């Protein structure tokens, strides 16, 4: 792929699309492609995470590192960004990622991503604002779930049974 195709690929990834073409050019130049054969492990649950991976072709299965009720595995396909948080801060991989078929991923290291944000402060601000809005949304959703659970767990009021 040429640089323009690489930039176009990054533009289709929601988090990266916020950054604008000049910043994406830097990411496209510095990112590394990696080919995985079917069954190959990209990373294991508990591994230190120092960047993100975008699936360019193929698919990966993600198996949680700890038993999670109701979630055995997830399948991620082209355009999926794995390790979004690892682009910004130290963290560990919560799942093991394995190729379901021949797969190509593009790795963006945290250092490259942070240097790009330093060089493009307007892009960094846009990303910060978007992530802040997402955190606010998650907070509201968690509060809504908490209210539902609190309502389910609260003792029922039954008139005439001494509950008044």
Image (spheres, grey):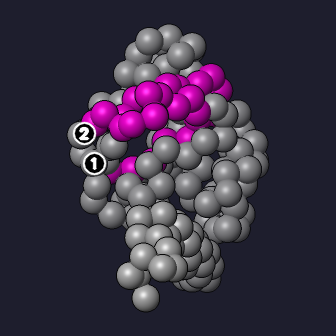
Q: Tell me which residue sits at (53%, 67%) in the image.
A: 148
Q: Tell me which residue sits at (28%, 36%) in the image.
A: 66
Q: Are marks 2 and 1 in contact (CB under 8 Å)?
A: yes
Residue that extends furthest to the bottom in the rendered view of this protein: 164
- Structural crowding at the residue carrying mark 2, measured as other residues with C-alpha within 10 Å and reported as few (<14), some (14–19) or many (≥20): few
Corner quadrant of residue 41: top left
Task: Specify the quadrant that holds the C terminus.
Answer: bottom left
Q: Tally the numbered discs.
A: 2
Residue at the disc numbered 2: 47
Nearer-the-camera pick, 153 or 137: 153
Indicate whether residue 66 is drawn in magenta: yes
What is the x, y in percent for residue 105? 54, 32
Mark 2 / mark 1, whichever is N-terminal: 2
Nearer-the-camera pick, 141 or 150: 150
Q: Tell me which residue sits at (32%, 50%) in the image.
A: 50
Q: Which residues are magenta?
A: 50-76
What is the x, y in percent for residue 103? 56, 21
Question: In the drawing, what numbered circle is on residue 92?
Answer: 1
Q: Is residue 14 left or right of residue 128?
A: right
User: Helix, strand or loop at disc 1?
Assistant: strand
């Amino acid at each position: 792929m040429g640089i323009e195709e690489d930039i176009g690929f990054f533009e289709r990834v929601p988090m990266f699309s916020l950054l604008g073409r000049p910043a994406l050019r830097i990411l496209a130049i510095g990112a590394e492609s990696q080919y995985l054969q079917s069954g190959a492990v990209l990373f294991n649950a508990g591994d230190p995470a120092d960047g993100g991976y975008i699936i360019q072709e193929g698919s990966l299965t993600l198996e949680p590192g700890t038993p999670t009720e109701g979630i055995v595995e997830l399948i991620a396909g082209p355009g999926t960004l794995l390790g979004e948080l690892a682009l910004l801060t130290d963290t560990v991989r919560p799942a093991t990622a394995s190729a379901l078929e021949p797969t190509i991923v593009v790795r963006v290291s945290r250092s490259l991503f942070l240097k790009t944000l330093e060089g493009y402060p307007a892009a960094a601000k846009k990303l910060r604002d978007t992530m802040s809005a997402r955190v606010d949304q998650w907070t509201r959703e968690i509060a809504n779930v908490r209210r539902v659970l609190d309502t389910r767990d609260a003792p029922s009021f039954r008139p005439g049974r001494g509950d008044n």
